[in-house]
Image: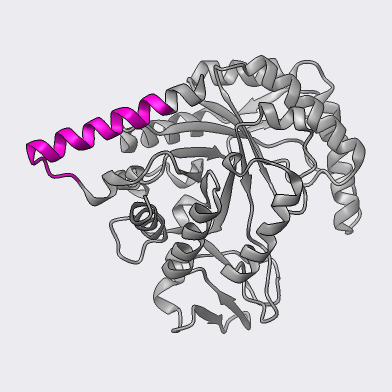
Amino acid sequence: MVGFLKSIIAFMTAITSLVTGFLGIETDCNDSVDKSFRVKSYVICDRILDPSSLCSEDFDIITDVILFGVATFDSKGNVTVDRETLDKALGNLKEAIGDRDVEITLNFLGPGSKSNSSDWYEQMESLGREHNKAFASMRLENNIIEVLDEYDFDGVHFDYEYPVTNGAWFGYNAFLVSLGSKLGDDYTLNVAASDWCLEYWELAIEFIDSIELMMYDVYDEEGKHATFDTVATRSQWIKDKNIPLEKITFGLPFYARPTDGDGYWYDYVSYADKLDANGFYTDESIGKTFWFNTPDVIAQKTKFAIDEGYAGMMIWHYTCDFPSTDEASLLRAVGETITANS
């Protein structure tokens, strides 16, 4: 059903282009972006409570919005939604999108770790146990669907990134199959994952519509964050997982990390005018240097994803960037690359 609808949309888009060309109707350059190659952007709800934080033209490029930061579930399978924030953010978002065909999914974050250990692996083991309790609750699926129904979302999204044990993967996969069977053709099922953490069952993959591959928070020998060469090399691992690339979007960081990998995330829009010719910025106040993905790097990654056969690009996250009407915009680089390679 989803494939059929996409075919209809592609056909109508082609007809629209022919008609507007014949009649001499002028359209914005981004209108020609190929919508069959998805551009998914995370949008943090509390960052768009001011309507001016959204640029309508951005949604000539963005095909999918992943609303983030307002929906959670606990270990008992109960769902909590910050409705005040969601209502305001969703209203602003829909106003900016207008009549464009943009899908909106809601991201659900699960329970946190209960471990007091500073060891990352032990933290993830504990997190997995808490998630498995929720997955086995027999109520989480229906509670999620109730929210999707209420707000008329196009689908659900999960950022359960690191199931590190066999037991955690078993619980997660079984839940995805259960939820996917209940969602049917009414809603899409989408997940975020790291390239090294992709132990999905074949049956679960059948139900998953999209895997957002987090190709960032990785470094080269110089400490440069998520370079083209680094992620292009790592992407070869994906082919060993036998997951169809047409179900995977290629993640782009619209932020930078310091060369020592420390816990700082600097957004591109705040530092773009401070970068040197090689994309570096040194924050003297903390004594750390950051390397940013600039528009040329983003364009290079986007072309790579197109050439390799990925489903599209994924962006973390929307308000880290300039509006696409600005020549310095990373999103603009994505859109122009897609158009040039359509």
Q: Give 235 or 75, whichever is nearer the viewer.
A: 235
Query: Can you give x and y, in whole percent of width and height, for residue 193 in the image?
Result: 69, 46
Render colour scheme: one colour
Query: Can you give x and y, in whole percent of width and height, for residue 243 in the image?
Result: 69, 41
What residue is shown at x 76% (from left), y 23% (from top)?
Answer: 77
Q: Give 75 or 233, whichever is nearer the viewer.
A: 233
- Compared with residue 255, is residue 12 higher up or lower down, i.e. above or below? above
On whether residue 20 falls in the magenta region, the answer is yes
Query: Can you give x and y, in whole percent of width and height, for residue 6 in the image?
Result: 43, 28
- Compared with residue 325, is residue 62 higher up or lower down, i.e. above or below? above
Location of residue 180 (image quadrant): top right
What residue is shown at x 80% (from left), y 32% (from top)?
Answer: 172
Q: Which residues are magenta?
A: 7-27
Location of residue 192 (image quadrant): top right
Q: Could you tell whether 86 is left or right of 335 in the image?
A: right
On whether residue 89 falls in the magenta region, the answer is no
- Residue 114 visible to the viewer: no
Query: Can you give x and y, in whole percent of width and height, for residue 46 in the image?
Result: 50, 43
Q: Report the number of discs.
A: 0
What residue is shown at x 48% (from left), y 20% (from top)?
Answer: 152
- Residue 327 visible to the viewer: yes
What residue is shown at x 73% (from left), y 43% (from top)?
Answer: 242
Q: Could you tell whether 289 is left or right of 75 in the image?
A: left
Question: Going by the picture, which residue comes out furthest to the left?
Answer: 23
| Main SS, magenta residues | helix
Q: Could you tell whether 16 is left or right of 114 in the image?
A: left
Q: Could you tell whether 176 is left or right of 270 in the image?
A: right
